Amino acid sequence: MSERILSVENLTLRFGGLTALDEVSFHIEQGEILGLIGPNGAGKTTCFNAVTGVYRPTSGDILFQGRSIVGLKKHKITQQGIARTFQNIRLFPTMTALENVLVGADAQHSTGMFSALFRLPKHRREESQGHERAMELLRFMGIHRKADELAANMSYGDQRRLEIARAMATGPKLICLDEPAAGFNPAEKVELMELIRKVRDQGYTVLLIEHDMKLVMGVTDRIVVLEFGRKIAEGSPAEIRDNPAVIAAYLGVDEEDAS
Amino acid sequence: MSFKSKVAGLPTPVKVLVWVLVAAFAYILPLLELPIISTPDSDFASVLFTVSIYCLVALGLNIVVGYAGLLDLGYVGFYAIGAYTVAILTSFHASWPLLLAIPVAVVVAMISGVILGAPTLRVRGDYLAIVTLGFGEIIRLVAVNTEWLGGSKGINNIGRPPNLGDPDKDGLFQVPHLFWGDGTVLVDTKDTTHFLIFGYADAVPYYWMGLTAVIVVLIADVLIKNSRVGRAWEATREDEDAAELMGVPTFKFKLLAFSTGAFVGGLAGALFASRQSFINPQSFLLLFSILYLAAVVVGGQGNRWGVLLGAGLVAYLPERFRGFEDFRVLAFGLALVLLATLRPEGVLPPRRTVRARQLEHELDELEEGSDGEEEARV
């Protein structure tokens, strides 16, 4: 259980003069749900983007299953087993729900032009495997009845669920969810919490960015708190709840108290 | 849509039969000499050959523009490369048989697609359009200024496809055309097509050759689109960054789309050169790139049947109305403007746009509240 699946070591990311991430270090253990929280602009999504290869770190290292993934192409990182969703939904809007998930499943496939053109056994095998897996995931998310619906025409909640299904289809070991509950009502949030637990129970490790403290406290095993690009706290939900630095970051403190 | 679902609901043997009948009709079309649709002012078979070449080009360009979403304004460049390769190999610098030169021509076009794509596919959208626009012009200007390529005089005596049967004995057999009199249909035994003699006067065998190429490319298009490759192209078109993060090597697939499009464009150019028997740089003006793109956009980019229809319209209408002399260009322009106004997604939009449009404003209303989210992204 205590095997480290991802460790971020002294990660620093600068955009010109702006330091978005400053010597951030944390790790995720196999099979846990780690929450990454912090006020707006703390660098949570930037941290995600560095892990998934969108940004190249200025310094520091990111190890996935013991190997550095810094400098790898984005699709290579996905193929190695890190999948993600997006804060503002980024599905393929004019493709059906099923096709969206199939694109994810294709990450583990290698059918090329030639196999497709001559319908070689490889194409058929991968195609049927992909369809099976995609339908299974849509059922898991409870949106299998909308498999042939265009992604753009689905409801907001279903789009969020579809994004998680698509990420799971890539065959990841670590799933990074970027504010999956944004725009959800309280009832939907509870449902989503259950879902995230179910995802973990299927053997995935989850990295979760979330604003909603109740949701984060309820579902995560450990929490890392960022503020202004620095890690200010790390620990179990109970420890984080009582941490004065975290309370200060979220509620603010008077000038005199701070100094 | 209802038509499509009706066709899809038919049992497989019936479907196959329908397609065979459609193909058979396409093959005998130039022999029927049907009134109204035949072109009174130019040879109908020649017009049909041009239509088949436009269909080929539109199918190829649809892969690049419609599927992968790469705006290519220099497609005529690949067409020219295919034509010039055939011209050089069968006439100007060697005397290869045409059937050997065509595979070389498409491979050369494909390689040129990779050479152009490798550095330029890193730029997106309008920038790519400008780069490809330059490419098309560069190919033409190189042809104008290089003596080895015939310069502005061009190349003639380009190889013809091999005949089946003896040309002196009128081929294997002769196929008569129909003649439409006043209310009667006669078999015109004086007007016959020799099977299968590729002569200068009769364009029907060339049309058959072009049509065969269209059918082969069409089948390949269906097979590739319904596979990992087709999905990867669509995902790249929809959201390149998201596709990359879902494990799609977008650059590789864009390059594949580009070279596949170049392959088909080169094939079209090679067939065109063989039929014309003469090419010069005037055959590959920028105007043609625009016309090809017009065919794709008018028909409905992303829908293979749409672009075939678009290619048919763009190639056929100006010939049908040749009798109007100079006014035909005006009429053609008016027709395009009307189409753009009445059917902005193309005559036959792909299913996505039909369904998406129905729910578009519904979605707009739903998404009005989510503008703030865009800014909140770190």
Image: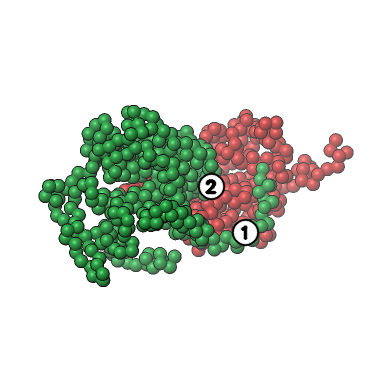
**SS state under label 1:** helix
User: x, y percentage for residue B2?
Assistant: 43, 68
**Which one is in front, B255 or A30?**
B255
Q: Secondary structure at mark 2?
A: loop
Badge 1 amino acid? Asp
Please give the label number shown on residue B279.
none
The furthest residue to the right: A256
| Residue underneath mark 1 | B364
The residue wearing badge 2 is B239
Residue lying farthest to the bottom in this orientation: B183
Q: Residues within 10 Å of mark 1 (few under 14, many from 20)?
A: few
Chain letter tied to red: A
The quadrant the C terminus of chain A occupies is top right
Letter of the chain that mark 2 sits on in the rendering: B
Q: Quadrant of residue B142?
A: top left
Q: Is residue B239 left or right of residue B55?
A: right
Q: Position of residue A190 (x, y in %)?
A: 65, 58
